[in-house]
Image (cartoon, rainbow, N blue to C red):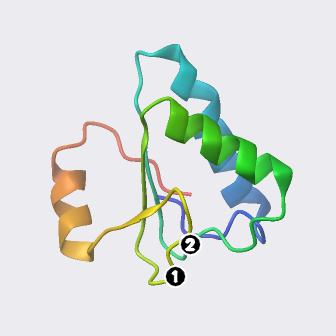
Amino acid sequence: MITGMPSEDRRAKEALRIAAGISPWGKVHPTVCFKNGIGQMEDPEIKRYLTLLDETGSNLFTLSRNLEKPLKTIKKSDLEKLQKNTPIILQF
C-alpha cells in the first residue's frame, strides 16, 4: 500500500521503485495499491517503474476514482480481502 502520490512524495516514489526492482526476480509478484493514485505521469521514472511492474505481471490497483493506466480500481472491501490473504504487507 502506497499512501502518498509518487509524483509528489519522495517516499512513495521510493516504494514504487523498490516494488519495480523486485518484480523481475520472478519469485516475488508484488501487488501494489495506491491509496490516492499516482499523480502526474510526466516523470519518466514513474512511467518506467509502472511499465516494469505491469510487464512482469504485478497487480496494480488504486482506491482513487481517477483511473490512471495501468492501474485498476479496487474497492476498500476488496482490498481488505486481498490483504487478509497476503503473507506480507508493506505500507509506505
Nearer to me, 18 or 60 = 60
Q: Which residue is mark 2?
A: 37
Residue 6 appears at what percent x and percent y?
A: 70, 63
Residue appearing at x 33%, y 39% in the figure:
88
Mark 1 residue crowding within 10 angstroms, few (<14) / some (14–19) / many (20+): some
Q: Amino acid at mark 1?
A: Asn
Q: Amino acid at mark 2?
A: Gly
Q: Is residue 84 left or right of residue 49?
A: left
Residue 66 appears at what percent x and percent y?
A: 52, 82
Give the distance between the C-alpha atoms of the residues marked 1 and 2, in whole angstroms: 7 Å
The quarter of the rendered structure image containing the C terminus is bottom right
User: For the residues carrying marks 1 and 2, which lies nearer the camera in this image?
Assistant: 1
Q: Is residue 45 left or right of residue 24?
A: right
| Outermost residue, bottom side | 65
Nearer to me, 52 or 90 = 52
Q: Is residue 60 left or right of residue 24?
A: left
Q: Secondary structure at mark 1?
A: loop
Residue appearing at x 74%, y 52% in the figure:
46
Mark 2 residue crowding within 10 angstroms, few (<14) / some (14–19) / many (20+): many
Residue 74 appears at what percent x and percent y?
A: 31, 69
Residue 2 position by quadrant: bottom right
Q: Which residue is mark 1?
A: 66
